[in-house]
Structures are given as C-alpha cells and as structure tokens.
Image (cartoon, rainbow, N blue to C red):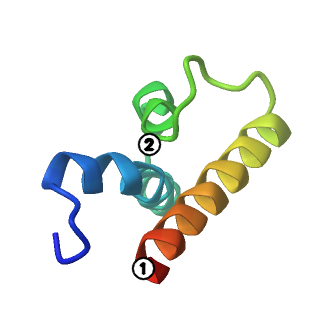
Amino acid sequence: MAKGLDEPQAQSMTAPLVGLNELRIGSAHIGNPELEPIFQLMGASTIPETPRAGWNFCVDAVGNCLCSIAGILES
C-alpha cells in the first residue's frame, strides 16, 4: 500500500511466493499437497508434466515475481 498498490494488486503480485511457500509446507509434512491450486497461484493453467518442468516453472514465476517487486520498490 505504501507504494500505491491496493491489497488485491499486492496479493496478485506476490501469489508466486505464496505458491512457493505452499510447496515448502507440503514438502515438509506427510501427505501430498494439492498441486493444481499451487501452480495456479504461480500463473500456470495446468500442472507441469514433469518434475523438471515444474521446477523450471516455479523458478521462473518466483524470479519474475521478485523482479516485479524490485521494480515497484525502485519506482
């Protein structure tokens, strides 16, 4: 909000970080996390077909998210 973003904009911008945290939580606990909503938070319409594709998608989504946040903070 301090940079002029309202709450929905900020949540949309940081959604990949939320998704990454959900993957971390799912990995740390017994059971399987629901992957579809997690990848939707990161901007995917479907779950990547291979673990490598999923990893690449996560890295790209989080990297883009951090670049967007840095751009907002620099402006």
Crowding near pointer 2: few (<14 within 10 Å), some, many (20+)?
few
Tell me the element at label 2.
loop
In this image, 50 relative to 60: left or right?
right
- Point out the frontmost of discs 1 and 2: 1
Q: Residue at x 52, y 75 (%)?
A: 70
Q: The N terminus appears in which quarter of the rendering?
A: bottom left
Residue 32: x and y in percent read 47, 38
- Amino acid beneath label 2: Gly
Up/down of 48 relative to 1, above or below: above
Q: Residue at x 53, y 56 (%)?
A: 27
The one of 14 and 46 positioned closer to us in this rendering: 14
Question: Residue 73 shows which numbered tag?
Answer: 1
Q: Of label 1 and label 2, which has the lower sequence position?
A: 2
Q: Residue at x 26, y 73 (%)?
A: 3
Up/down of 45 relative to 13, above or below: above
Q: Residue at x 52, y 71 (%)?
A: 71
Residue matched to label 2: 31
The one of 52 and 61 positioned closer to us in this rendering: 61
Residue at the extreme front: 75
